[in-house]
Every structure is written in C-alpha cells, then in structure tokens.
C-alpha cells in the first residue's frame, strides 16, 4: 500500500479530530488494508483525507455533532473506471469492492485516528448507514454536464475527489418529463426536516443519466439547473423563524440576517446556487437528494488524486 | 515466518503541559464561563453554574465568553485570553 504511492510512511497529513491522532501515511495505509482496499485505491483514500482535513470542511464538527451527516466521497476522472468504482445502477449500495472499501477505509481512519466513538465524543443521535461506507463515482460518460471536480477547479481529464458530509440519500421519484423531474426535486427538498431548512449551508442532488440527458436536450445546463432549484426551493421566513431562533438562541451574533425579513418573504435553502452540488450517477430512474449539516460545516472540499 | 502486528490507532502528539493544581476553594476566585454557543439548555445551565458558585462560595466573580462559532473549536487566542483573565474556567457547556 505504501510502496504503491511512493511516500514516506511517516509523512503526516495532519491530525484527525477530535482524538488528534496523527494521520501518517503509514496509519492511513494500515486502516486502508483493514478496510479491504487494494493498493490502487490508496491514492483515493489519501486525497479524501486531504479533503476532510481541510479546515473549511470542519471535521472536528462533523465528527462530534448531534446531527446525522456523514462524509460522502465522490470520485471523478478516469481513475473511477480504472478502479471500477461504481457510478451506475445501485451506486450507493453493494457489489463493488472499490466503493465499499474506500468508504470503509475512511471510516476506520476517522474511528481509529479521530477516536469518535458513538455515544462518547461522537454525539450523533442517529447517524446513518453511510457511516459504514459512503462512496460513489460520478458517471461522467453518461453526463452531458461538466463533472463535479472540473466545476470545482480541477483540470479536465484529471482525477479528483470531493468530500461532502451529508444526510443519507433520499429517493426522488421521477418518471415523467422535465417539468415533473424539476418539480419532484423541488418538492423533495422543501421540507421542514433538514438542516438546510434553518441553517442553510450546502446540499447535494444526484441526478440520473436519463434525467440529466432530458434536461440537457432541452437546453438546461448545470448553472441554470442550480439556479432553478435554488429559486424554487425558497421557503417562507415565518415557517423557519421558530426553529432558527431556537437553534441559535445563545449565539445571537450568528442569527442569520434573513430572519430580519418579513414572515411572508421567501429565502432559499442555501446562500448561493453554487452551494447546491450536482452529481450524475445511478441507474436510469429516480434521483436522489442529500441535505447537508447547514452552515455549521461538512462543506464540500475537492482535491486532486495524485497517483 | 515473522509476523508484524501493526496498530491502526493514531498516535497523539502529547504536549509537555501539566495539569494545573485545582484550587481547594473557589472563595475569592474569578470563574470564567465559556458558552459553546449551541441552543437548548446551555444558557440555563450556565446561569445555574454561575448562581451556584455565588451561593456556595464567597466573593466569586464570573466572567462570560461565547465561542465565535458554535461548531468549531475555540481559537487559541480566546483560550489564552480566558486563561489570563480567570482562576478557573468552565468550558464545553451546551446542548
């Protein structure tokens, strides 16, 4: 595992909160072997850890919060096919060693180096099954839109990993035309249950190849799609006021500015359309949405995979 | 055959700091309270701690801080400021 990446075993990527275990290449390798990774997967694990250790992600927060977000690893570039990381039918399920073991390696690293034991320092009330392993590849071959890692600044043709800590995926039934698809996604997101409802932050939409092709054929690009979802998932301030004020009750300095608006005014679920992440994956039917942790952290971070 | 057993658990950088000796009494002490900033019962808990300290000990003074952002650790500058301003501190109260 270590010789595959030709790196010093004692090289440290940083410390993994909250336990502050030192993330040496050697420790990452040990946990990757325990997770069942092949050596070829190890560069992906390293890049994912670089994402998680970026302060912008706020790993200390995601490792200890009461919320249920878990890190989703999204792989882009030619390496996804080379490693047989599933991006198609059953993408978030079983059957593919790379998906299962890369996600598992990350979990073991967060466990063994970060020491976030459930019920102890890890205060997640429920967590979700993605805490065992949560990894997919984007189906770039079937997508007419710019892949996630390129949209986020990496060169075309490069290999990249994006980590976004989010809820478990929620199915969005969609068997109709574009209007039906857009409406179903909007209606799935405009619930009062998730953290974007009161604390904005970021969220993820996983589009099926069928629906993204339908959208593209009708002139929709990713920017237009995000703008549409952003505008149409806006919810009334009055509906969100009580939950938001309670959540921020002892930190008035963090109370969102939008709470100053009238109850009947509408505010989006994220600050900007760009905070809605869009990935193409899965089979031909249904789409998925996965809300984030709100403004508290778990934000998407992208890193190049260095082979 | 030689078997090498590897430890998956991360090593921790241990600082050289030793734990401060706890005061025998809080009489006449300055108590710092650091609010984590999460909602719920935190505010009531902190108020209760403050009131309890004033009832149980004499000439207690309390100073109050809030973390700048509730989901991230306190900046070291804030920790230093608290450490220089108080005799004891109550931290990590929220929820």
Image: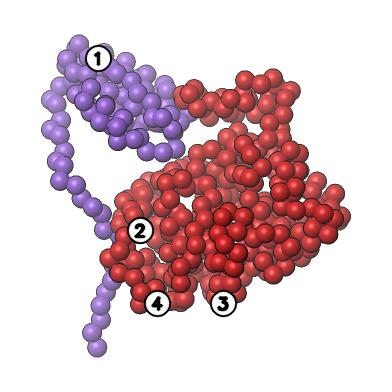
Chain colours: A red, B purple
> Which residue: 33% across, 53% down?
A15
Q: Chain of mark 2?
A: A
- From the viewer's perspective, is A188 left or right of A68? right
Q: Are marks 1 and 4 on the same chain?
A: no
Q: From the viewer's perspective, is the residue at label 1 or at label 4 nearer?
A: 4
**CA neighbours of label 4 inside 10 A, class few (<14), some (14 to 19), many (20+):** few
Q: Is residue A59 above or below residue A111?
A: above
Q: Which residue corresponds to the image point at 66% horizontal and 53% vertical from the top-left?
A: A278
Q: What SS does tag 1 mark?
A: strand
- Crowdedness near tag 2: few (<14), some (14–19) or many (≥20) residues, C-alpha within 10 Å: some
Q: CA distance from mark 3 to mark 1?
A: 65 Å
Which residue matches tag 3? A82
Residue A4: numbered disc: 4
Tell me the CA gap for discs 4 and 2.
Answer: 17 Å
Image vertical order of residue A211 relative to residue A223, above or below: below
**Contact (CB < 8 A) between labels 1 and 4?**
no
């Amino acid at each position: 595992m270590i010789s595959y990446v030709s790196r010093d075993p004692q090289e440290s990527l940083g410390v993994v909160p909250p336990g502050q275990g030192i993330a040496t290449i050697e420790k990452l390798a040990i946990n990757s072997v325990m997770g069942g990774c092949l050596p070829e997967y190890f560069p992906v694990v390293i890049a994912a850890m670089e994402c998680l250790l970026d302060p912008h992600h706020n790993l200390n927060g995601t490792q200890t919060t009461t919320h249920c977000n878990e890190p989703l690893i999204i792989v882009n570039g030619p390496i996804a096919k080379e490693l047989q990381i599933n991006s198609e039918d059953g993408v978030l399920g079983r059957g593919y060693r790379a998906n299962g073991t890369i996600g598992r390696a990350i979990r073991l690293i967060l466990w063994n180096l970060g020491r976030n034991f459930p019920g102890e320092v890890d205060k997640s009330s429920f967590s979700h099954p993605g805490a065992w392993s949560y990894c997919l590849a984007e189906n770039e071959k079937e997508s007419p839109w710019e892949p996630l890692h390129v949209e986020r600044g990496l060169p075309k043709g490069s290999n990249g990993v994006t980590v976004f800590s989010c809820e478990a995926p929620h199915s969005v039934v969609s068997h109709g035309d574009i209007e039906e698809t857009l409406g179903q996604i909007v209606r799935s997101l405009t619930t009062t249950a998730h953290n974007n409802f009161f604390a904005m932050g970021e969220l993820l939409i996983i589009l099926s190849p069928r629906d993204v092709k339908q959208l593209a054929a009708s002139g929709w690009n990713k920017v237009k799609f995000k703008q549409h979802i952003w505008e149409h998932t806006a919810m009334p301030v009055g509906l969100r006021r009580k939950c938001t004020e309670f959540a921020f009750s002892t930190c008035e300095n963090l109370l969102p500015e939008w709470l100053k608006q009238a109850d009947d005014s509408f505010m989006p679920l994220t600050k900007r359309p760009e905070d809605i992440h869009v990935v193409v994956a899965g089979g031909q039917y249904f789409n998925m949405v996965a809300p984030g942790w709100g403004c508290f952290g778990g934000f998407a971070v992208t890193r190049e995979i260095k082979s | 055959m030689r078997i090498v057993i590897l430890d998956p658990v991360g090593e921790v950088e241990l600082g050289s700091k030793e734990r401060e000796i706890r005061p025998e009494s809080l009489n006449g002490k300055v108590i710092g309270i650091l609010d984590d900033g999460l909602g719920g019962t935190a505010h009531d808990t902190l108020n209760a701690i403050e009131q309890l300290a004033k009832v149980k000990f004499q000439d207690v003074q309390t100073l109050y801080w809030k973390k700048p952002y509730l989901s991230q650790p306190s900046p070291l500058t804030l920790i230093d400021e608290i450490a220089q301003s108080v005799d004891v501190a109550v931290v990590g109260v929220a929820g």
